[in-house]
Amino acid sequence: MKRFIAIVLALCIAAGLCACGKTGGSSSQQDDSGSSDSASGGDVSSQEQAQSEDESPPAAPSGPAPGINLITGNPLTEGQTAGARPVAIMVNNIEAAMPQRGIASADAIFEMVTEGGITRFLALYADRAAIPRIGPVRSARDQHVQFAIPLNAIIVHIGTSIYAENLLKVYHYPTIDGLYLVGSLAFQLDEARKAAGYKQEHCWYTDASLIAAGMEKNSIPADGATQPLFNFADPGTKPTPTNMANGLSFSFSEIAPVTLTYDSATGRYAKTAFNNPQIDEATGEQLAFDNVILLFAEVKPKNPDDPNNDLVDFTLTNGSGYYFCNGGYLPITWRKGNPEDPLRLFTSTGSELSVATGKSYIAVVGSDREATLIIDEPQVDSAEPEA
């Protein structure tokens, strides 16, 4: 496995150095930050071919599929089946692309920096047939992909960074990529939104029927998932942390602040972005989550010597963080490792964390931004009682 990972890293580094020289069946989209998303329809490199000949990629998670919603931990609803693969959709999250559509229906959302301080969502849906119109759909990044692979999720995106492209190739991981299916099967352009002044890359959407068409076109199997997102507690069981908090705020970068405020009436944390409630355009609903998981990781430039390459590299091995639920919080540690390894969370005593069932928001933030975290703890009245 060490040899395999070394090959992956070598491929990514080599591709990053020669990305500007790609020819043949390649195209690119320009991100708002100025970096480009690239994908190639041509053959894999000879180095990748050599790798695939002498070492097989890691197998998908095996074993019996638990009879729960793999993303929320709740019991399966009518029509859902154990082992159905969840769907992971890359969603634009820059201010100029808001409001997004369909994100309030996600079972879980990962948010991470991509480049230039902007962030992107990986929105997870366990019930493929119930996915509403969602978007704007955007390109994949390798840091997001590494959380989708262990879930054996069906990844839906429009383009990739060169690093994500190489990771998917090495793992022989088929996806629904709008760079090849845009305007034909799996995605639709919202002409009204474009006419309203949005850039075209902020106007592409997908939904359950379009995803089904993309799966059929690319021969992507619907079943084969066995790994839950977390170690879930029994349904209906919520932790009662001794550290109480009304919410939290932090920032991914100087341009991407986030606040999550606990509502005791709903038991959920309402999310703001860019100092405004983050709203689902289709429902008017503010994003809200049962669980908030904040993880700190080392984040650095992919290629610090290239001023035109501001993509970032995440070290997804282990680190510290916090778990917020039920109006309280506790410090945690986390561990991952290889791209195919699942995310695991632990309490301060070293036991595996039991996460409450329900919707989750997972923010993976650079360790250098840890000082931006403010936990809104209730004020304690220390005044002396009157005699």
Image (cartoon, rainbow, N blue to C red):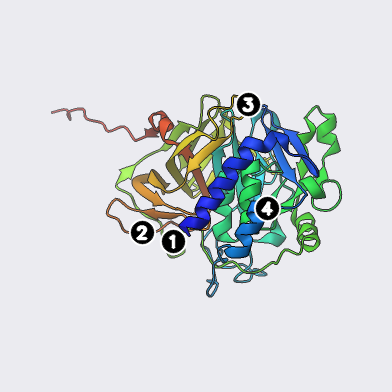
- The amino acid at mark 2 is Glu
- The amino acid at mark 3 is Asn
Looking at the image, tell me whether mark 2 or mark 3 is earlier in sequence order: 3
Looking at the image, tell me whether mark 4 or mark 3 is earlier in sequence order: 4
Looking at the image, tell me whether mark 3 or mark 1 is earlier in sequence order: 1
Q: Is residue 362 left or right of residue 328?
A: right
Residue on which the image places disc 2: 352
Q: Quadrant of residue 97?
A: top right
Residue on which the image places disc 1: 231
Residue 104 visible in the current orientation: no
Q: Nearer the viewer, residue 387 or 242?
A: 242
Residue on which the image places disc 4: 46
Quarter of the figure with the C terminus:
top left
Residue 226 location (% of width, % of height)? 55, 68
Q: Nearer the viewer, mark 3 or mark 1?
A: 3
Q: Which mark is residue 1?
A: none
Check whether the beta carbons of the residues at disc 2 and disc 3 lie within 8 A of each other. no
- The amino acid at mark 1 is Asn
Q: CA distance from mark 1 to mark 4?
A: 40 Å
Number of dots carrying numbers = 4
Against 239, residue 67 (above or below) is below
Check whether the beta carbons of the residues at disc 4 and disc 3 lie within 8 A of each other. no
Q: Nearer the viewer, residue 237 or 155?
A: 155
- The residue at 70%/52% (across/down) is 44
Residue on which the image places disc 3: 308
Q: Quadrant of residue 214?
A: bottom right
Residue 314 visible in the current orientation: yes
Q: Nearer the viewer, mark 1 or mark 4?
A: 4
Q: Nearer the viewer, mark 4 or mark 2?
A: 4
- The amino acid at mark 4 is Ser
Question: What is the secondary structure assignment of the residue under circle 3?
Answer: loop
Question: What is the secondary structure assignment of the residue under circle 4?
Answer: helix
